[in-house]
Amino acid sequence: MICWPCLLKLEGEHELIYLADESEFIAECEELIVSDDDYVVDSNGLSYLLKFSNKTNNSRVQLVDAERQLSKQEVTLLIREHEFSKANVCLTKIEFLTISCAVLCSL
């Protein structure tokens, strides 16, 4: 079961998109061009792939368990890359106690 909030990671981009809940995820998928290579990381570090019933308009997007759990260090690295792309903070100061804290505090 997906533990919200989550982060949407777009393939080839360092930007992360904060998703408070499933309705926000659906809204983002309607506004963005997303692909099968994009994925979502939940507050427990579990990753989910995006699957579509109709790729032409991103209809019926579903999150499918990728059977991979990211470590706290991997989630921290994603957030550091995101922050580096914005060039707003010192990257070495970015640390979190848990993945849940990382997701909640990162964006």
Image: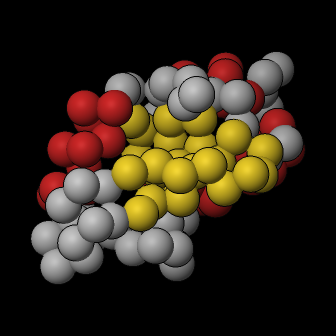
Q: Position of residue 68 (x, y in %)?
A: 77, 52
Residue appearing at x 25%, y 32% in the figure: 23
Q: Depth check: give the residue in front, 33 or 56.
A: 56
Lateral position of residue 106 relative to residue 54, left or right: right
Q: Depth check: give the residue in front, 86 or 28.
A: 28
Q: Depth check: give the residue in front, 13 or 87.
A: 13
Location of residue 57 with respect to 74 vertically, above or below: below
Lateral position of residue 91 relative to residue 37, left or right: right
Location of residue 1 with respect to 9 vertically, above or below: above
Residue appearing at x 82%, y 20% in the figure: 97
Residue appearing at x 78%, y 45% in the figure: 69
Look at the image and tell me whether residue 97 can be seen. yes
| Figure colour scheme | secondary structure
Q: Quadrant of residue 44?
A: top right
Q: How many marks?
A: 0
Q: Quadrant of the N terminus?
A: top right
Q: Position of residue 100 (x, y in %)?
A: 67, 22
Look at the image and tell me whether residue 106 can be seen. no
Q: Position of residue 31 (x, y in %)?
A: 16, 58
Residue appearing at x 51%, y 42% in the figure: 7
Location of residue 42 with respect to 91 vertically, above or below: above
Q: Position of residue 87 (x, y in %)?
A: 53, 57
Lateral position of residue 82 relative to residue 21, left or right: right
Lateral position of residue 84 relative to residue 15, left or right: right
Location of residue 49 with respect to 3 vertically, above or below: below
Q: Quadrant of residue 98?
A: top right
